[in-house]
Amino acid sequence: MPRPPRSPWTFVPTLYFAEGVPYILVNTVSVILYKRLGVDNAAIAFWTSLLYLPWVVKMLWGPLVDLRATKRGWILTTQLAMALCLAGIAAAVRLPAFFAVSLAAFTLAAFVSATHDIAADGFYLYALDDHQQAWFVGVRTLFYRAAMIFGSGLLVTVAGRLEISLGDVPLAWTFAFGGAAAVYGVLRAWHGFALPRPDTDAPRARAGAPGRAGWRPIFASWFRQPRVVAIVAFILLYRLGESMLLKLATPFLLDGRETGGLGFTTAQVGLAYGTVGLGCLIVGGVAGGWLIARFGLRRMLWPLALTLNVPHAAYLYMAHAQPAPTLAFALVAVEQLGYGLGFTAFMVYLMRVSRGEHRTSHYAIATGLMALGMMLPGMVSGAIQEAIGYRAFFLLVLLAGLPGLAVLPLLPHLDDEPAPARRP
């Protein structure tokens, strides 16, 4: 007799939690780890920004995931590989050559994570019917954000407390990443049991999965859009200030007051940036979505773009005043709330320019350019900060918001109906 269908509640929450954990560990927690291990800001910003590369180019091997083996098989394989990568990072931080070895493990984890993203998002489409897909969008977003709180909040806070209790920073982070590897191993074991086997998830060519010959017209159709130069400029420049701030925010909080920072402990950073700040980021994202649905993107784009960029002044103020932790927590929360509001408008616009029969591939192109816009400025941000100091750097971050704002009047597609999001 055929087995009854498995409820999406048994696998959608954990699948998107598993999707979010490596992203936050690779792109955010790695910065805190290297800062605590004594790596300089220029090296941290350059190398951790380069870790965005797999998300920039993942569209290039998306057809391989679609055409070879099942999405379920890809998910289980990449989750096992991710658990091993995290265990490798845990072991590497105590080695004399910790930076090179751990960076290699982070790089492998980034490629594995990007591949897992492709497989998980595809599996979601095959394992759920249309009604379930729409209903569970909010669930997957919630658990993806929960993974961020786990990584940049709970894990960093635990590492900070272990630093104090053990008196050994590398050992504390070994335990932290070892715990993350164990959690990921449990997720892999659960999904081996819980993931269904939909008939449509078969290793064969599917409609809408471009082969090698299909990539050229797909790319050409995206780049033939009206005012595509303005669209590309918007994608690359809208978050220019944020892309520079992102890599230096936690080093600024951790650096001593004598060097221009705030002198936070690791646990305080986990609370300020990974828990309180991330909570405000989530609230901002929800509020931004409501505002766009209520008033439309054309009316809300300018206000939301300003909420993204103007709160960068909070870091400029903190660099000058070096306030107490309570006020600094509040200012970080305000900046993250503004980022959540402004980022929502950005993602809605990316969906507007992902059009036609190849909408999924077009969205991959847009998000690849988005990752490129984060990677390149981030790579040089550390060297700039070391050359000019935190005060001048945060002033530069504030001014870097102006090019993105200047592009807004040139954008097309502001009056189109929004397309539903495919992933959180």
Image (cartoon, rainbow, N blue to C red):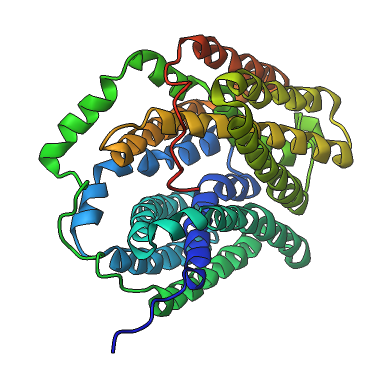
Residue 259 coordinates in the image, percent (x, y): 75, 30
Residue 157 coordinates in the image, percent (x, y): 72, 58
Q: Would you say 25 lies left or right of 294 here? A: left
Tell me which residue sits at (35%, 57%) in the image. Answer: 125
Q: Would you say 213 lies left or right of 225 here? A: left
Q: Would you say 91 lies left or right of 338 here? A: left
Residue 274 coordinates in the image, percent (x, y): 68, 49
* Number of numbered discs overlaid on the protein picture: 0
> Where, by quadrant of the figure, is residue 158 drawn?
bottom right
Residue at the far bottom: name it: 1
Tell me which residue sits at (49%, 49%) in the image. Answer: 99
The N terminus sits in image quarter = bottom left
> Where, by quadrant of the figure, is residue 77 drawn?
bottom left
Quick check: can you spot residue 91?
A: no
Tell me which residue sits at (38%, 61%) in the image. Answer: 129
Residue 134 coordinates in the image, percent (x, y): 47, 53
Quick check: can you spot residue 366?
A: yes
**Frontmost residue, 94 versus 204:** 204
